[in-house]
Image (cartoon, rainbow, N blue to C red):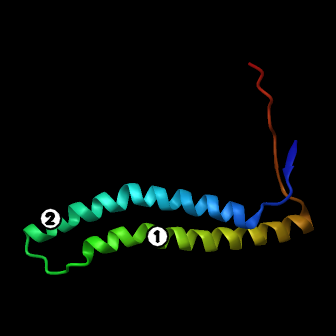
Amino acid sequence: MKRIKRFNVWQTAKVVSLMYFLIMAVFMIPLGIIGSIVGGMFGSHFPFSGLMFVFLPFLYGIVFFLFTALGCAIYNLISGWIGGIEVEVELIEE
């Protein structure tokens, strides 16, 4: 049995926020481009709708950075009191 004693708050937050940024960019940027084209075809006069979809991945990255850092800090505090999450690992030899 292994135990996760603590997370490095900033490193974990950087990794998670970059993951969410990339996931959102893959979906939102093409969706924004398509939405702008389709909206233009139907006479939508909201010119920043496509820009909103480009902005959303950055917003998700910032928000998930903050929440992951907060979550890791809380985990580190609690794991100091009651112990960390226990996992069982298996060594696979090739």
Q: Position of residue 17 (x, y in %)?
A: 57, 63
- Amino acid type for the residue under numbered disc 1: Phe
Q: Position of residue 73 (x, y in %)?
A: 77, 71
Nearest to the observer: residue 22 or residue 91: 22
Provide the secondary structure element on which disc 1 rests.
Answer: helix
Residue 58's tag is 1
> For the point 78% across and 66% down, which residue is it?
75
- Whether residue 6 sits left or right of residue 65 in the image: it is right
> For the point 62% across and 58% down, which residue is it?
15
Height in image: 55 above or below 7? below
If the image is split into quadrants, where does the C terminus sit?
top right
Nearest to the observer: residue 87 or residue 56: 56
Q: Earlier in the sequence, mark 1 or mark 2?
A: 2
- Whether residue 43 sits left or right of residue 31 in the image: it is left
Q: Position of residue 21 (x, y in %)?
A: 49, 62
Q: Position of residue 7 (x, y in %)?
A: 78, 60
Height in image: 64 above or below 85? below
If the image is split into quadrants, where does the N terminus sit?
top right
- Amino acid type for the residue under numbered disc 2: Val
Tag count: 2
- Whether residue 19 sits left or right of residue 79 in the image: it is left
Residue on which the image places disc 2: 38
